[in-house]
Amino acid sequence: MPILTIKNWLDPVLRKKGTPVENIDEALVKLTEDMYETTLDAKGAGLAANQIGLAYNLVVVDMGIEKGKHDLVTLINPVITALDGEELSEEGCLSIPEVYATIKRALHVEIKATDLDGNDVRYEAEGFMARAFQHEMDHLKGALFWDNLGRARRDLLKRKFKKKQKEKMT
Ligand SMILES: [Zn+2]
């Protein structure tokens, strides 16, 4: 199974809203398998389809990452049904590698989605996993974790990103 290339935030696809997935077919199953591999390879908590260049309403999340036991799930056309509480914590993004910021998120989240068998599924999560879900849901809106920070903080993170990219080239 090939590991897909993760687009970085400079790619306009990261600003595209996900279009609803209408058919669950072989190609979609194959795509999610590749997304699982890519998430594991990148040591990420999740991946949205637009991060690999396909702006669909589709994310994969590793529900087991906190326990060190991988448990990847596919969420097709996910919707947040409840958000509760508040937590400040450090957050990163596979499309903004090696750059982290403290971001305010809901502490508790409930999500409904469709799975690969076409069944309705619901997930509840708290803390780190709730953060991961909210982060991936943002990607489906074409949003990035630094969008709600002030301009100055975001510019600082952009400079950090550029510096890290430069280091990688040399
Ligand atoms: Zn991300």
Image (cartoon, helix red, strand yellow):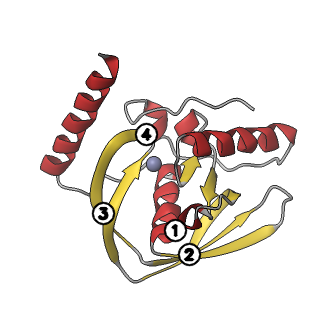
Label 4 neighbour load within 10 Å: few <14, some 14-19, many 20+: some
How far, Cα to Cα, is label 3 from label 2?
Answer: 17 Å
Q: Do the residues labelled 3 and 2 touch (CB within 8 Å)?
A: no
Q: Tag 1 or tag 4, which sits nearer the N-term?
A: 4
Q: Are marks 3 and 4 in contact (CB under 8 Å)?
A: no
Residue of label 4: 95
* Label 2 secondary element: strand
Residue of label 1: 129
In this rendering, the answer to whether 137 lies above or below 154 is below
Residue at 64% of width from left, 31% of height from top?
A: 3
Q: Note whether ligand 1 is within 8 Å of mark 4.
A: yes
Across and down, in percent, residue 43 comes to 52, 47
Viewer can see residue 142: no
Where, quadrant-wise, is the C terminus in this rendering? Answer: top left
Residue of label 2: 125
Residue at 22% of width from left, 43% of height from top?
A: 157
Residue of label 3: 103
Residue type pointed to by label 4? Ser
* Label 3 secondary element: strand
Q: Are marks 1 and 2 in contact (CB under 8 Å)?
A: yes
Q: Tag 4 or tag 3, which sits nearer the N-term?
A: 4
- Residue 121 is left or right of residue 50, and the answer is right
Where, quadrant-wise, is the N terminus in this rendering? Answer: top right
Residue type pointed to by label 1? Met
Q: Which of 128 and 119 is in front in this view?
A: 128
How far, Cα to Cα, is label 4 from label 1?
Answer: 18 Å
Q: Are marks 2 and 4 in contact (CB under 8 Å)?
A: no
Residue at 30% of width from left, 51% of height from top?
A: 100
